[in-house]
Every structure is written in structure tokens, then in C-alpha cells.
């Protein structure tokens, strides 16, 4: 008779939501930063959060009430989907700062799902976990978009819809720099500036950029990726919310970036490069630009085909 584990831990990497041109549709993972979830099986048929530690402000703003927490709500959805008769106790270690534009709320719920899934009598595949992840993410953003949770579940560059996620082919020479300044920008505030409608010609031009970008990825064509990696819809409205953004983007482009834009809702800024060495040089220049605007920052550099969430130990 097999014995099911009673505890599991998982790590989920951070992510770049939107990738500029793919608002709520595209994302890729980031190497070197993420959240950890420790999940324990309990007899009581409920989800409870025992503790939240790590990268938190002076007063923790993350609710311990499961239904108001992205990870807690994701596990509530998992219990409902699988109809299990036991519950979960969750401990979170935050490695992603709040309001950073690096998918912190998504990383917590994906890490929790991967850990809890390992405790099920019959674990689900990652595509079956997607709906639960969307339920969790909606707690933080107020909407069910998968541009952060999908790449965390699958790794690399992912396209997502409300019902499915698709890993996209991307050349291995693509590297990303993601610079996070000492600023906080809440997702709901960043989404509020997008409420006004867009003129149709601008939407058509944006669609052309998205098409070029996707074809460029599929064909491994640097020129097409660069031609498409331009956000003319969201970036112009959100840029004023990020002091120093224009200078940081200019620094990336001056180092031959294929493109640069806002990571997720901001304030982090990302840029893509066709060479790891050039990416490292650009990272210093991007950080210097934020410093000139009065902000310390952290830089994360790695392949665009980044890692996915995995069990620990």
C-alpha cells in the first residue's frame, strides 16, 4: 500500500508579465528570484495560512485569511476541483517584493499549488492546475489573467488565454534584464490608468507589432522580434507612474536591446538582448539610470527561456 506524503515545498520563479507587446497574453519567467511555499496536509477540510515571511514591508499587507490571499484562494480552488476530504496548512516565504511588477502574487499561488498537488492521491498535470492559479491571481489583480501564472507553471515564454496556456518556442540566445527599483506600484492602480478606450488605428498597429513579435520568436529572427517588441498601448499610460522609466529604457536601447518596456504592472523594467554579455553591460547602465532618478535597484539577468516552478527537496 502506497503512503502519500504529508508535506511538500515548492519554489516558483518571478516573471515578466505582458512582455510589453502582449498585455495579459504573454509572459516569461525570471531566473534567480521567486517565492517558496511549504504545504502540510491536515485532517480539517479547510485551507489555513500559518505564516508569511521574507520580502515584506514594515507592516505586512498580505492577508492571512485564505480566501483573501492568492495562494490560499488557489488551494481553496484546488480542494473544490479535486473534492478531497482533507485540507492544507500553508507557510509562505516571499522572495519577490510586493508591488514590484515581478509576479509576486502569482508566484505565491503557483508555488502553493505545486506543493499541494504533490500531496494529492492523484496529482493533476500543470494544465489542470491553471484554473486554480487564475482563481488565486484574481484575488490580487481583480481579473483572471494568466500572463504571470502560466509561465511559472510551464517555464519560458508562454501565451495564455482564460482557458489555456501554450509554451512558445524562443531562441536560446535571447536574454532578459529585469531591473527592480525601490518603488512600489500596486497592480490595481496600474490597471486603472488603462480604463479609457483606445482609438482603432492604434489597436491595429499594436496587433501588427504582436504579430511580428510572435513570428520572430517562432523563426528565431532578431529583426522581427525587435520590430515587434514595442508597446504603444499600455506603456505610454503607465510610464508616468514610474519615475526614471524613460531614462532606464533609453539606457537599455543604447546598449542594443531588442526592446524594453514595463515588467507586468511595474515599476520593474525589462529589456531583451541577443547576447548574455551585452545584457550584463546593459544592466549596470539601467541601474545607473534609476540611481540618477534617486532610486536604488536590483537587477536580474538570465535566459528568456527561464525555469518553471518545481518541488524542493
Image (tube, rainbow, N blue to C red):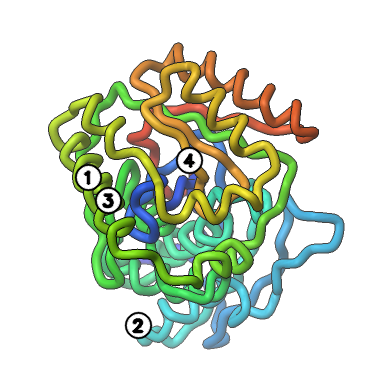
Q: Earlier in the sequence, mark 1 or mark 4?
A: 1
Q: Is mark 4 on a helix, strand or loop?
A: strand
In this rendering, the label closer to the viewer, 4 or 3: 3
**Residue drawn at the location 74% of the way across and 41% of the way down:** 182
Q: Which of marks 2 and 1 is nearer the N terminus?
A: 2
Q: Is residue 125 among the parts visible in the rendering?
A: no
Q: Which mark is residue 205?
A: 3
- Could you tell whether 245 is left or right of 120 in the image? right
Q: Quadrant of residue 88?
A: bottom right
* Label 4 sits on residue: 261
Report how far apart the C-alphas of labels 1 and 3 lie in the structure.
Answer: 22 Å
Callout in the foreground (2, 4)? 4
**From the viewer's perspective, is the residue at label 2 or at label 3 nearer?**
3
Q: How far apart are marks 2 and 1 (CA)?
A: 28 Å
Query: From the viewer's perspective, is residue 242 above or below residue 185?
Result: above
Contact flag, marks 1 and 3 (Cβ < 8 Å): no
Say which of marks 1 and 3 sits in front: 3
Q: Distance between the residues labelled 4 and 3?
A: 17 Å
Decide: is 105 above or below 122: above
Which is nearer the eye, 98 or 20? Answer: 20
Eye-nearest disc, 2 or 1: 1
**Does label 2 or label 4 sit earlier along the sequence?**
2
Residue 176 position, x and y percent, is 44, 30
Q: Name the residue under label 2.
A: 81
Q: Find the distance from the CA under tag 2 to the CA under tag 4.
A: 37 Å
Do the CB atoms of the residues marked 4 and 3 lie less than 8 Å apart?
A: no
Label 1 sits on residue:
168
Amino acid at each position: 500500500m502506497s503512503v502519500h506524503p504529508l508535506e511538500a515545498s515548492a519554489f516558483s520563479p518571478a516573471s515578466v508579465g505582458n512582455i510589453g507587446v502582449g498585455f495579459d497574453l504573454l509572459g516569461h519567467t525570471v531566473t534567480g528570484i521567486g517565492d517558496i511555499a511549504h504545504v502540510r496536509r491536515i485532517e480539517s477540510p479547510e485551507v489555513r495560512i500559518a505564516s508569511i515571511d521574507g520580502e515584506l514591508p514594515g507592516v505586512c499587507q498580505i492577508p492571512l485569511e485564505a480566501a483573501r490571499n492568492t495562494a490560499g484562494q488557489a488551494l481553496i480552488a484546488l480542494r473544490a476541483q479535486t473534492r478531497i476530504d482533507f485540507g492544507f496548512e500553508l507557510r509562505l516565504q516571499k522572495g519577490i517584493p510586493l508591488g514590484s511588477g515581478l509576479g509576486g502574487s502569482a508566484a505565491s499561488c503557483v508555488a502553493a499549488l505545486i506543493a499541494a498537488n504533490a500531496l494529492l492521491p492523484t496529482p493533476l498535470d500543470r494544465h489542470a492546475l491553471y484554473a486554480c492559479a487564475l482563481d488565486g491571481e484574481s484575488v490580487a489583480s481583480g481579473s483572471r489573467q494568466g500572463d504571470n501564472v502560466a509561465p511559472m507553471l510551464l517555464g519560458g515564454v508562454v501565451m495564455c488565454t482564460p482557458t489555456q496556456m501554450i509554451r512558445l518556442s524562443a531562441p536560446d540566445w535571447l536574454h532578459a534584464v529585469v531591473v527592480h527599483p525601490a518603488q512600489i506600484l500596486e497592480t490595481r492602480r496600474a490597471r486603472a490608468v488603462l480604463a479609457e478606450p483606445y482609438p482603432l488605428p492604434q489597436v491595429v498597429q499594436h496587433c501588427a507589432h504582436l504579430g511580428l513579435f510572435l513570428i520572430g520568436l517562432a523563426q528565431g529572427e532578431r529583426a522581427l522580434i525587435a520590430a515587434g517588441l514595442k508597446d504603444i498601448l499600455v506603456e505610454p499610460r503607465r510610464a508616468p507612474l514610474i519615475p526614471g522609466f524613460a531614462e532606464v529604457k533609453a539606457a537599455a536601447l543604447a546598449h542594443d536591446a531588442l526592446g524594453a518596456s514595463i515588467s507586468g504592472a511595474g515599476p520593474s523594467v525589462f529589456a531583451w538582448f541577443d547576447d548574455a554579455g551585452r545584457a550584463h553591460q546593459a544592466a549596470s547602465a539601467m541601474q545607473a539610470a534609476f540611481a540618477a532618478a534617486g532610486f536604488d535597484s536590483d537587477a536580474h539577468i538570465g535566459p528568456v527561456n527561464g525555469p518553471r516552478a518545481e518541488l524542493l527537496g
